[in-house]
Image: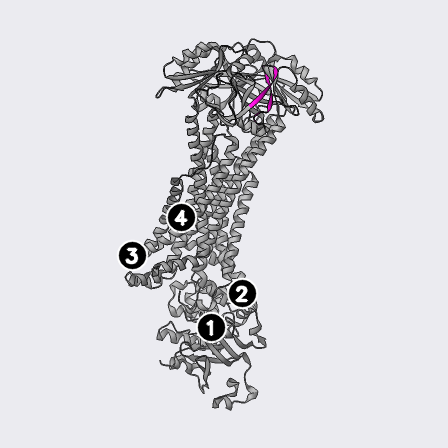
Amino acid sequence: MLSALDRKLLRNLRTLGGQVLTIALVVAAGIATFVTLQGTWQSLHGSRDAYYERYRFGDVFAVCSRAPRSVADRVEALEGVARVYPRVTHVVSLPFDDEPEPAAGQVVGIPADGAPPPLNGIRVVDGRWPEPGRADEILVLDNFAQARGLEPGDRLAVILNGSRRELTVAGTALGPEFVFAMEPGAAIPEPDAYAILWMFEDAASAAFQMEGAFSDLVIKLQPGASEAAVIDAVDRVLEPYGGFGAVGRELQSSNYFLSQELQQLEQMATVVPFIFLAVAAFLLNVVLSRLIHLQRPQIAALKALGYPDRAIGFHFLKLVTVVVFLGALLGVVLGRVLGGGMIALYTEYFHIPDLAFRMDLRTGLTGVAVSLVAAVVGAAVAVRNVIRLPPAEAMRPPPPARYTRSLIERLGFLGLFGTSARMVFREISRRPLRTALSSVGISMAVAIMVAGRFGMDSFEDMIDTVFSRAMTEDMAVTFVTPVPHRAVRELEQLPGVTRAEGMRVVPVRFENGPRHRDAVIFGQPDDLTMRTLMSSDGHEVPIPREGLLLNATLAQILGVSVGDTVQVHVREGERGVHEVPIAGLIDEMYGLQGYMHIDSVNRLLREGRTVSYVLLAIDAAHEDEARRRLRDMRGVQSLFSRRAMIDRVRAQTGETWGAMTFILTLFAATIAVGVVYNNARVALSLRSRDLASLRVLGFTRAEISAVLLGELAVQVLLAVPIGLFMGTWMAEGIMATADPERYRMVAIISPQTYAFATAVTLASGLVSALLVRRKLDHLDLIGVLKTRD
Amino acid sequence: MVTAGGTNEEAAGEGAEDAPDVVIRAEGLSKVYRMGEVDVPALRGVDIALYEGELMVLLGASGSGKSTLLNILGGLDVPTEGRCFYRDWELTDADDAELTAYRRQHVGFVFQFYNLIPSLTARENVALVTEISDDPMDPADALALVGLRERMDHFPAQLSGGEQQRVAIARAVAKQPDVLLCDEPTGALDYRTGKLVLEVLQRINLELGTTTAVITHNVPVSKMADRVVTLASGEIHSETRNATRLSPDEIEW
């Protein structure tokens, strides 16, 4: 049996239907973002840790040119090292007959006896482990296999050390070191263009003449060991063997990208739900204070009848609770669905076995608890104000509202406005805080849309600057080893090639005292036309004749500036160490690299005029033929087509951003409608008497709508510029959290984004206005005249 | 017709040739309110007319149907049955927009609870109406007419009840309406203030010649009328014509 008070609660809920629904939707949006983002973060984080643990992911990773197996034992003897796993890894290419460009790949050795690797384990997804003794059997990275439609038993052509071999796919697999598998130097992961091939150690050693040697070391640390000390020690041991510099997990390529993503996700998971829940609390406050205001006499009667304050306060808190739970239920369900979608998106880039959206009960409950607390805080103030009143006072109608001339009128613009406009302005100046808060609420919606879309704008801007203005070649060719400069002229002779320009790209380690970073130096000629050095503000920067032009972020990391020298450890060929003066710094949008004149690089390396990277301009009509010829050319390692890359980058990021933008827009519109509609309903209940009086006096529906909706229009119009400003500010904040070693994009917001956010907000306002307008058509003209306010 | 025919000796004494024009006429008005499961009749077949320039008082106990009648005559409500005309215009055929136009152009209302807009000053409350009518008075003149020239720029919250009601009257007459309909205009006021408000209504009726109907449950007030119609249980119970109208200050209650 329901108590009388609970019956009242149910009736209130029914009469407040539209308001209950819109507020519940805002709460749902808040909880859904919370559940989606937190759940996605937790799922990724938890799955990653479990995956690393279960498949024995190493702590330190080192690569060298070639070291005898005995060196591995020396590393294992180092203090802090628990275990080492030496293996052979090597870059390969995978030609596909019907494609002009080969795919890139890496061979990774596995124990020849068929035992699982002691570190950096492998999980077979499909098929089986290769049979010991069968040198041609391999495991292929599952992402690549899926993108290429490869199945166990299929044959795969691989260029091993210059000669073509047909290998058999025994199974497809995943590994913790390849969660995010991206070809070194590529801008984005392309699953069909980069393969990992696990091959028996003896077969790999034979193919690359690495018998009795290793080129890759996975190291497990002892608990409590100093990672930095071990890295230093390993580098010293491997230096004579062409060590490329050991890295910890933090800088291990796959884990680095995954960690970056997790870090950004964690930030989003905190900020975005907070905005939604704050708006929901505000709405609950507005609606409840009005409801309580309307029920003042009833509250007084309840008190007179002997209901304690606590019971009355609790009665209204129940109302809040019902709204929050409705929203919470919807939010959790929605959050699970969206979270599943997010995980599906992540699965395309991050390959963790058994990755699924898992929402633990705590996340759901935390979301509900947080929104409940926000809502109760929002409502508590209004409830307290009423239960504090003595019953006799509460039973009397509240004193009439006091109005004054609004600021605009006092400034002397009175003549500009009719009586209706004056009513609007006085209403606003009587409750400036409510107008301000409403505007802030709506502006949150605008800001969310701006912040949700700006990434796309900044990204387009980056594509424009980097791929359209700074790079203009049609194709770039890299060579396995540097080639004499005359190769450039030879490439220019190919049919369809209209121009060829050579560069010398050298992998190096920049070192200044204890600070170091592994990077590359681009050696460029003066007359290079197909690449332009562009600073992030769009200015061209000339290449110095002498010395090094260093990326400004890299200079900061190394603690060097113009006029200093930096130690350059060359990571190929003769592997010398050189002191190079810094001639200039360049602010760039992404990457860490240095630039030198090609002659300086050749001199530094004591080599003749050589190049390792050739840019080609190709006549579109002959492009396919040129590609085929290039692919079959000896010494060519890989081909990059600029246009294909732009297309792929656009398609991939477009998909991710598109989904994100759509969801955020939907939620933002929910907020806008939630605020505008509820304000309109509150304004309507506050002023239905005035409006009915106007109708009696002969005002048309359109005229009284103008009076009521004028106030909302002012709120929305105020909200738009505030929101655009806040959105810009949020966008800059988000950009600032991006890892500077990866991207240094400026937050670019296109006029279309501003227009879009404005349009959606205005449309939401209009829809809310129309919903309320319907109520205006049913004003009780007679009833209102018979009752005292 | 009950009204024109005259159950009343004075009405019969006047010649039919100089009978004033009918401004509003209603025939067989019935109004039934549906209160959940039961039908509550508020009017049962009322015939009534309002003549040019007269001051009519509608008397009746609470629930007698007098407000319902006034609301229908003023275009605020529609009857369940019967017809109602403003001059030759059948209001019972009019749609919502036409009724709005009728109120806007021809009718002035005064209510028990004033119904002023709290965010507008006295002058602006009057201007509210003058801005949307064809041939209005100056709001200041209308307020002078009710003796409030000095308090024109006060907001409702700064005015007493009687003053607020006088603003409401000024607002009603400022558009120079053809009919002034007042529903318990003194109901919320004390004796002295009530008298003051009635004097204003009398002056407007005499000076501007505005046809006026006043609802009251206060029997002595009927002495200021040309004609008194009494309603009981939704029907016209009696109709009398006063030989002489008394000024409100001569009336005691």
The amino acid at mark 2 is Ile
| Residue A516 within the segment the image draws in magenta | no
- Secondary structure beneath label 2: loop
Q: Chain of mark 4?
A: A
| Residue A157 within the segment the image draws in magenta | yes
Q: Are marks 2 and 4 on the same chain?
A: no
Q: Label 3 belongs to which residue? A: A309
- Binning the other alpha carbons within 10 Å of mark 1 as few (below 14), some (14 to 19) or many (20 upward) gives few
| Residue range highlighted in magenta | A151-169
The amino acid at mark 3 is Asp
Residue A632, relative to residue A415: is it above or below? Answer: above
Mark 2 touching mark 1, by CB under 8 A? Answer: no
Label 2 to label 4: alpha-carbon separation? 42 Å
Horizontal side of residue A10 vs A521, given as left or right? left
- Binning the other alpha carbons within 10 Å of mark 4 as few (below 14), some (14 to 19) or many (20 upward) gives many
Mark 2 touching mark 4, by CB under 8 A? Answer: no
- Binning the other alpha carbons within 10 Å of mark 2 as few (below 14), some (14 to 19) or many (20 upward) gives some
Residue A101, relative to residue A17: is it above or below? Answer: above
Classified by dominant secondary structure, the portion drawn in magenta counts as: strand
Q: Quadrant of residue A527?
A: top right
Q: Are marks 4 and 1 on the same chain?
A: no
